[in-house]
Image (cartoon, grey):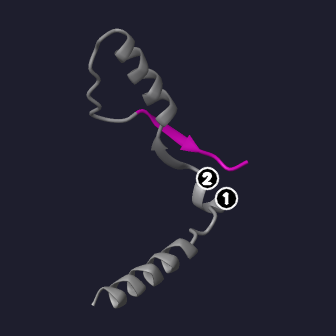
Amino acid sequence: MKTPFIVAGLSGFSLLCGCAPAPLTKADVDGRIVCNVDQMDQVERAAVRNNRQVLWVNCPRAVLRAS
């Protein structure tokens, strides 16, 4: 009973590993608004140094532009 489960699990895992997302095109990226992860990281590191706690209500925004 374990053998079919193992075979099915391995085959499913191999199928999932083989599926790569399509690369983003200029149309996908140009003007897209996302959270500015770098700024959030800087603020959180400064808070840790000062023994403070950061609770994010809204994330700082960044606009992705394709060059």
Quarter in which the N terminus is drawn:
bottom left
Whether the magenta-drawn stretch holds residue 39 is answered as no
Q: How many numbered circles does the render carry?
A: 2
Specify whether 21 is left or right of 43: right
Q: Which mark is residue 14?
A: none
Measure the C-alpha gap from mark 2 to mark 1: 6 Å
Tell me, yes or no, whether the two marked residues, 2 and 1, touch with CB atoms within 8 Å: yes
Residue at 60 percent of width and 69 percent of height: 22
In percent of width and height, residue 52 lies at: 28, 14
Query: At label 1, which amino acid type do we have?
Result: Lys
Badge 2 crowding class, 10 Å Cα cut-off, few under 14, some 14 to 19, many 20 or more, is: some
Residue at 73 percent of width and 48 percent of height: 67
Q: Quadrant of residue 43?
A: top left
Q: Which mark is residue 30?
A: 2
Task: Give 17 or 51, whichever is nearer the viewer.
Answer: 17
In percent of width and height, residue 3 lies at: 36, 88
Specify whether 42 is left or right of 52: right
Residue at 27 percent of width and 33 percent of height: 57
Q: Is residue 8 above or below residue 50?
A: below
In percent of width and height, residue 17 lies at: 53, 72
Query: At label 2, which amino acid type do we have?
Result: Asp
Farthest-out residue, right: 67
Q: Is residue 55 above or below residue 16?
A: above
Whether the magenta-drawn stretch holds residue 63 is answered as yes
What kind of element bears circle 1? helix
Looking at the rendering, the stretch of residues picked out in magenta corresponds to 60-67
Residue at 67 percent of width and 58 percent of height: 26
Task: Give 21 or 63, whichever is nearer the viewer.
Answer: 21
In percent of width and height, residue 12 lies at: 44, 81
Specify whether 46 is left or right of 56: right
Q: Which residue is tagged 1? A: 26
